[in-house]
Image: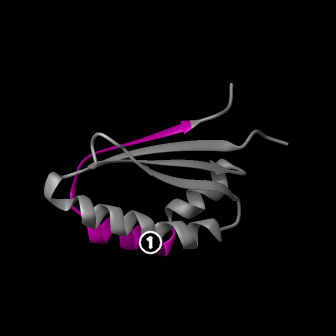
Amino acid sequence: MSMPLTIVAIIEANTDKVELIKAELRKLIEPTLKEAGCIQYDLHQDNDNPALFLFYENWESRELWQKHMSSTHIAEYMKATDGSFSSFALHEMTKA
């Protein structure tokens, strides 16, 4: 059996769009946790910089995570937040 895939996604909202980004990110949690292969999907917000968000995710496989990335709820999030964040970084990781 292969090692689970860990995803660390770091999103920094534009300062005037923090509440929009937060609301849209929260909408992703419930449907994502129901997806095949989703082991963990935790949203965090920085205590000192409220515009900075982090998703810590664990997936059974890269293929199932890629299916998630093609989901309707991800597409809806991208449309709703277009132009609302200053940076986005995605890291695919495996436990060392």
Position of the C terminus by quadrant: top right
For badge 1, the amino acid type reads Lys
Residue 11 against residue 19 in the figure, above or below: above
Is 62 left or right of 83, judged from the image as shown? right
Image side of residue 80 versus residue 57, left or right:
left
Question: In percent of the image, x 47 and y 75: which residue is there?
Answer: 72
- Span highlighted in magenta in the image: 71-92
**Depth check: 55 or 45 in front?**
45
Question: Residue at left 51%, top 70%?
Answer: 71
Residue at the front extreme, as displayed: 47
Q: Nearer the viewer, residue 75 or 38?
A: 38
As helix, strand or loop, the secondary structure at mark 1 comes to helix
x 50%, y 65%: residue = 70
Q: Position of residue 25 (x, y in %)?
A: 40, 63
Question: Can you say whether 95 is above or below 92 in the image?
Answer: above
Circle 1 Cα neighbour tier, 10 Å, few/some/many (<14 / 14–19 / ≥20): some
Foreground of the two, 28 or 49? 49
Question: Which residue is the extreme one toward the top?
Answer: 96
Q: Where residue 40 sits in the image (x, y, percent)?
A: 64, 54
Q: Is residue 81 magenta?
A: yes
Q: Is 83 on the left-hand or right-hand side of 56?
A: left
- How many numbered badges does the structure rendering display? 1
The residue where tag 1 is placed is: 27
**92 on left or right of 64:** left
Q: Position of residue 50 (x, y in %)?
A: 28, 49
* Residue at the outermost left position: 16
Position of the N terminus, as image quadrant, is top right
